[in-house]
């Protein structure tokens, strides 16, 4: 994969990314490709190299691990995917549905809604929740209350929002996994960090590389990467982004965005999932993990949503061409058709704000993770690098 080596080395040299780590494997657990380079931080005096063991904020790549935790709780018999969660989460959806925002009165027009919200909806982004940073109506609602989007110490502080649609009737990308993580905590009587440590990280041997609280972990705290930012127009060179401190004052385990881990550990996690490792789930639970969850109406809503604006496309499309139909599973976004030279039909993708991305390609029996720590979120030039990485892995197995 000489071309992959070269384009990432050029990206580091140009200042597009400070550093990176790439790993790919197959369904038999074989390592197909591994490469790291650049710096772990651009802070003055910090000369650490970016390696497979560098600890990174993976943001929404947390969601896949939370989905595994939910399905483990289902297997334990303490959680039902289709039972309503309002009795467990009394504040969820308490504001009803936002219809519009009255600018003159500086207040939202809300409609009462008591529809059932299920864990299945939370994991499928059909619960009506949307991230406030993605929707002007919610941003205005926040501002009218003197609040900033995406802030606060707990899931309730950040995620008790008006719904954008009645549960089960549409698609919007939001805090479903944060709420689902709270459901796991309540039903298992454990923190999400402790539950994942016992049920996911220790069985896979990644407990010293993974946590919601890396600064409290002796094995991790000295390996945490810094976040860098490109210029105002997204141009290199990147500089240290001292203002970026995920989870931004959060004290809860945010199941949608709060995890820190290394590329090596996330590769181990993806490898276990692709080969259906029974240490994590039973065979039928893996089938549920990857099964498309959207009905025809919600699937159309997803495809419309991804194309709603250039920003939505940048943050959500994973550079999957717009003509390719998309659906959603508990694992992530599904490309229902293949793309010659890049991925097979049914490949699942997702990523995270600091330009991190993973894929699992069942048809070709491969998976990969590309990890770096740079914003703006999912910057097109960086995600284009990850596409070439994915192409290189597929080319290698097709030889």
Image (spheres, rainbow, N blue to C red):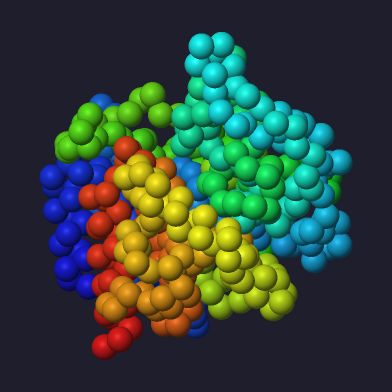
99 horizontally vs 366: left or right: right
> From this viewpoint, is residue 235 visible?
yes
Residue drawn at point x = 60 percent, y = 63 percent: 294
Residue drawn at point x = 43 percent, y = 39 percent: 224
Q: Which image quarter: residue 14? A: top left
Judging depth in this view, the residue of 231 and 23 nearest the camera is 231
- Image coords of residue 112 (percent x, y): 75, 32
- Image coords of residue 213 (percent x, y): 59, 37
Q: Which image quarter: residue 398? A: bottom left
Judging depth in this view, the residue of 299 and 194 nearest the camera is 299
- Point out the residue furthest to the bottom here: 399
Seen in the picture, residue 230 relative to 177 is either above or below; the reply is above
Judging depth in this view, the residue of 151 and 219 nearest the camera is 151
Residue drawn at point x = 27 percent, y = 37 percent: 47
333 horizontally vs 395: left or right: right
Q: Quadrant of the C terminus?
A: bottom left
Counting labels gives: 0
Q: In which quarter of the image is the N terminus?
A: bottom left
- Image coords of residue 361 (percent x, y): 44, 75
> From this viewpoint, is residue 255 visible?
no
Residue drawn at point x = 70 percent, y = 71 percent: 285
- Image coords of residue 269 (percent x, y): 54, 63
Seen in the picture, residue 205 relative to 189 is either above or below; the reply is below
Seen in the picture, residue 214 relative to 360 is either above or below; the reply is above
């Amino acid at each position: 994969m000489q071309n992959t080596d070269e384009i990432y080395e050029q990206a580091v040299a140009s200042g597009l990314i400070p550093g990176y780590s790439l790993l790919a494997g197959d369904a038999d657990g074989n390592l197909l490709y591994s490469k790291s380079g650049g710096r772990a931080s651009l802070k003055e005096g910090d000369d650490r190299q970016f390696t497979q063991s560098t600890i990174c904020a993976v943001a929404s790549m947390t969601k896949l691990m939370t989905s595994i935790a939910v399905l483990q709780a289902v297997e334990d018999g303490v959680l039902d995917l289709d039972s309503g969660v309002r009795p467990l989460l009394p504040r969820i959806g308490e504001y009803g549905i936002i219809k519009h925002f009255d600018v003159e009165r500086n207040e939202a027009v809300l409609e009462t809604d008591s529809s059932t919200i299920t864990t299945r909806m939370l994991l499928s982004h059909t619960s009506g929740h949307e991230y406030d940073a993605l929707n002007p109506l919610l941003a205005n609602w926040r501002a009218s209350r003197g609040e900033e989007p995406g802030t606060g110490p707990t899931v309730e502080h950040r995620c008790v929002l008006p719904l954008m649609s009645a549960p089960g009737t549409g698609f919007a990308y939001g805090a479903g996994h944060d709420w689902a993580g709270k459901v796991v905590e309540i039903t298992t009587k454990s923190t999400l960090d402790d539950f994942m440590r016992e049920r996911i990280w220790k069985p896979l041997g990644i407990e010293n590389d993974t946590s919601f609280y890396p600064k409290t972990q002796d094995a991790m705290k000295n390996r945490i990467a810094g976040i860098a930012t490109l210029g105002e127009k997204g141009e290199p060179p990147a500089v240290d982004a001292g203002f970026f401190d995920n989870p931004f004052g959060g004290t809860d385990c945010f199941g949608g965005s709060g995890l820190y881990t290394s590329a090596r550990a996330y590769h181990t996690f993806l490898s276990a999932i692709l080969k259906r490792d029974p240490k994590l789930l039973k065979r039928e639970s893996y089938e549920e993990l990857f099964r498309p969850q959207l009905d025809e109406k919600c699937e159309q809503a997803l495809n419309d949503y991804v194309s709603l604006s250039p920003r939505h496309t940048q943050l959500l499309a994973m550079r999957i061409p717009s003509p390719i139909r998309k659906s959603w599973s508990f694992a992530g976004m599904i490309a229902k058709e293949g793309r010659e030279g890049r991925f097979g039909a049914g490949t699942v993708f997702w990523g995270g704000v600091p330009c991190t991305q993973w894929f699992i390609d069942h048809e070709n029996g491969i998976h990969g993770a590309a990890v770096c720590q740079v914003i703006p979120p999912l910057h097109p030039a960086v995600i284009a690098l990850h596409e070439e990485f994915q192409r290189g892995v597929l080319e290698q197995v097709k030889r």
